[in-house]
Amino acid sequence: MSGTSFNPPDFSTVHGTAPDGARSRTMASSAPAHSLVPNVSSPPPAQAGPARLRLANAALRFLWDNQWATMPSLDPEALIARAAAKADAAPDGDPVGWRARLNVLCDDLERHAHLTDLGRTIAHGQLVSALTARFRAHALWQRYPSIAEQPIAAPIIIVGHMRSGSTRMQRLLACDSRLTFTRFYESWNPIPGDPRVDARKWKGRVGLACARLLNPEFDAIHPTAWNAPDEEIGLQNLSIYGAAFEAQWRVPGYTAAVEQDDGVAVYREFRRLLQTLAWLRNDTQPRPWVLKVPQFAQDLAAMLQVFPDARLIHLRRNAADVVASSASLVCNQMRVQSFAVDPHWIGREWTRKVRLREERIAAARAMATVPQIDVDYEDVTRDWKHEMSRVYRMLGLPLTGALLTRMQRYLHNSHAARRERHIYDPARFGLADHGVER
């Protein structure tokens, strides 16, 4: 799974004025024509949706109307200023182009995302959180340049679309103590704020609690825990990059900008963030890192340039199933933050994205010289032990009986913990009805 937002809303506000509408911000990119929608500057008076969301929106509007709080700004400079104040660190020199992407993203949020009051608050909080972590990271690297020398052993890159079984594969591999992985709280809160007190675990718990409160379907879509192995999508947010934002909001200009970026500078920074996590853990014995973000499918060429010693596990699943399940996930997230969600547009957009990523995977793998293997979603479902034995032969590691027992325990516990299945109707997204999927 990919793109799910976990950061709790930031109900604190920026001193100043409410957003000033859709300012013109441009960069060398253009959105696909089918992505563009009319300008919508403010939500309608009566916002539809579940009672919990209507209540949250009404409460926020009441606070703003009575001047007990200020409407959160989505002005890029205001977001940067607030993040710098929270980080107690100056903005970095922008080696990855995050400022240009932030400008386009904020413009999209104002003009195309149809944000509710809650959506505006969540967007403000997420962007401030990402920028705060970014500024802290760059300040930390200046104080401790030796972080750049932290070794990253040959990583295992899981390449697959959202809903292709990448979480299952990552967590099966995470049962192996010879390997390492990113934990949920590390992905979404990678840099401690106070060097004396590491509050990242607490923030991870709070983030999950907020996600479940606002979106009860969350556990059916992506069961997890604050310390569970999870994808590194939160690390990409620090570069204002990747699909986490696309999966929450309708942001065509930002989507185009990310698709047009070769990603190499971003993944060099991504590597430095992994080194930082290892340094914070005080890892003295480097182990191969199991890396999993569906965005890798779009950027595999850049990943292989930055990690030339990687091993690839390419997950395959029927494209129609991938698109339908991805569309359901994206629609679920957008409904929490937007008052106008078009399921058919979501179906078209993720059909396009899956096709684009398939093309890029094929092109990058055709040029790759690293060890790699294809693993089919249905084959893992049918006989996971056989498929994992294939994976371990590619990795050159013995698959022991004790490890198989730990993997079996994970699968059993995962099935037992799932409160309900992820059920959806592909026809709702304008897709051919090929059955209900999990």
Image (tube, rainbow, N blue to C red):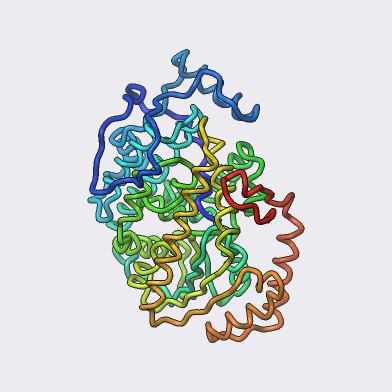
On the picture, is 137 further left or further right than 294?
left
> The N terminus appears in which quarter of the rendering?
bottom right
Q: Check the image and report above or below for 33 versus 403.
A: above
Q: In the depicted view, which residue is nearer to us: 393 or 409? A: 393
Give residue 60's position: percent from left, percent from top. Answer: 51, 23
- Across and down, in percent, residue 391 comes to 58, 80
Question: What x and y, as percent, mark residue 140?
Answer: 33, 55
Q: Residue at x 41, y 66 (%)?
A: 359
Q: Quadrant of residue 59?
A: top right
Tell me what residue is drawn at x 30 percent, y 44 percent. 89
Position of residue 211 in the picture relative to residue 26 (left or right): right
Q: Is residue 351 above or below residue 68?
A: below
Q: Vertical placement of 374 versus 187: above or below? A: below
At a point 48% along the width and 36% down the height, the residue shown is 122
Q: Is residue 290 left or right of residue 27?
A: right
Using residue 26 as the reference point, say whether residue 214 is left or right of it: right
Q: Position of residue 330 (x, y in %)?
A: 54, 46
Please tell me which residue is depicted at 43% across the width and 24% down the height of the picture: 42
Q: Is residue 77 above or below residue 133?
A: above
Quadrant of the snapshot with the C terminus: bottom right
Q: Quadrant of residue 57?
A: top right
Who is closer to the viewer here, 257 or 177?
257
